[in-house]
């Protein structure tokens, strides 16, 4: 068991519905990983030899997700997020609670509240209740029911710890079109949808090259 596997094992015992416990425990873990970049660098260098993790890495037009560790039972993952130029979020909640640490760059964080919504919501009428600036070193934890959105500086990098999924779908809202729709987890995606977002090795090499160039790890 290497240091990354040990970290994931520690995270498996969290009560992920207790966001105070999530914040305290994951802050210690994220602090440890940020203070020891060789742990993440070592996992990145070895990821090509871990097809079970490479298969979980995703590439979108405005976001890359690299999965560093995953524990299927209970469903904990450690990921790197790289926000690309043009990134913006539509207000949404999550299928799981999570914690994040900003490693490079920053983003503007909009919180709409712990709101139980459905697709009949009018996004343009959803009020922003709290706004945060998340600079380098900022750490926060978010309950899966919280509706939020971020606007990221290009090439912002965050380290994310996500807990077990507690629901099959989450709601996404577009304030410009006033539309809302459900999005589902990987197990409910078609093969075409899954293949379209899967990060290939060429893209993985490009993103890890950026991280090295920027001195993140």
Image (cartoon, rainbow, N blue to C red):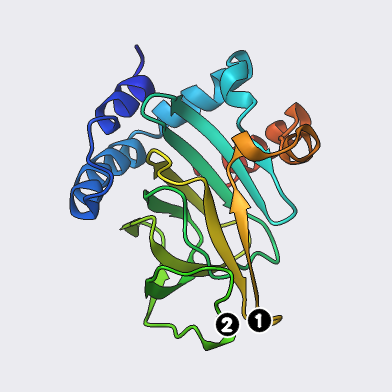
Q: Where's the N terminus, which quadrant?
A: top left
Count of residue discs:
2
Give me the disc on residue 30: none
Badge 1 vs badge 2, beta-carbon distance below 8 Å: yes
Q: Is residue 84 left or right of residue 102?
A: right
Within 10 angstroms of label 2, few (less than 14), some, or many (20 or more) residues? some
* Residue at 41% over, 31% down: 75
Reading the image, the residue beneath label 1 is 178
* Residue at 55% over, 62% down: 171
* Residue at 71% over, 80% down: 177
SS label for mark 2: loop
Q: Is residue 127 above or below residue 71?
A: below
Residue 123 on image: x %, y % = 57, 80
* Residue at 70% over, 66% down: 86
Q: Is residue 194 above or below residue 17?
A: above
Distance from Cα at disc 1 to Cα at disc 2: 6 Å
Residue 167 on image: x %, y % = 45, 46
First in sequence: mark 1 vs mark 2 = 2
Is 171 in front, or is 127?
171
Q: Is residue 26 left or right of residue 176?
A: left
Q: Quadrant of residue 210?
A: top right
Is 157 in front, or is 5?
5
Residue 82 on image: x %, y % = 59, 50
Q: Is residue 60 left or right of residue 27?
A: right
SS label for mark 1: loop
Residue 215 on image: x %, y % = 52, 43
Is 117 in front, or is 186?
117
Reading the image, the residue beneath label 2 is 122
Q: Is residue 92 above or below residue 124?
A: above
Q: Quadrant of residue 153?
A: bottom right
Within 10 angstroms of label 1, few (less than 14), some, or many (20 or more) residues? few
Q: Is residue 156 left or right of residue 94?
A: right
């Amino acid at each position: 068991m290497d240091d990354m596997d040990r970290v994931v094992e520690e995270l498996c015992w969290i009560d992920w519905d207790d966001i105070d416990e999530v914040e305290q425990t994951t802050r210690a873990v994220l602090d440890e990983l940020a203070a020891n970049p060789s742990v993440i660098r070592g996992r990145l260098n070895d990821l090509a030899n871990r097809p079970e993790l490479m298969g979980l890495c995703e590439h979108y037009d405005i976001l890359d997700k690299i999965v560093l560790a995953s524990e299927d039972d209970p469903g904990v993952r450690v990921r790197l997020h790289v926000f690309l130029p043009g990134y913006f979020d539509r207000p949404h909640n999550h299928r799981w609670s999570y914690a994040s640490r900003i490693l490079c760059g920053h983003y503007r964080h909009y919180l709409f509240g712990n709101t139980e919504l459905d697709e009949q919501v009018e996004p343009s009428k959803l009020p922003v209740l709290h706004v945060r600036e998340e600079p380098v070193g900022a750490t926060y934890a978010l309950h899966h029911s919280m509706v939020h959105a971020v606007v990221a500086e290009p090439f912002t990098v965050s380290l994310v710890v996500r807990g077990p999924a507690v629901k099959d779908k989450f709601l996404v809202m577009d304030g410009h079109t006033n539309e809302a729709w459900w999005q589902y987890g990987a197990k409910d995606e078609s093969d075409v949808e899954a293949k379209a977002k899967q990060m290939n090795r060429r893209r993985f090499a490009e993103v890890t090259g950026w991280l090295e160039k920027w001195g993140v790890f």
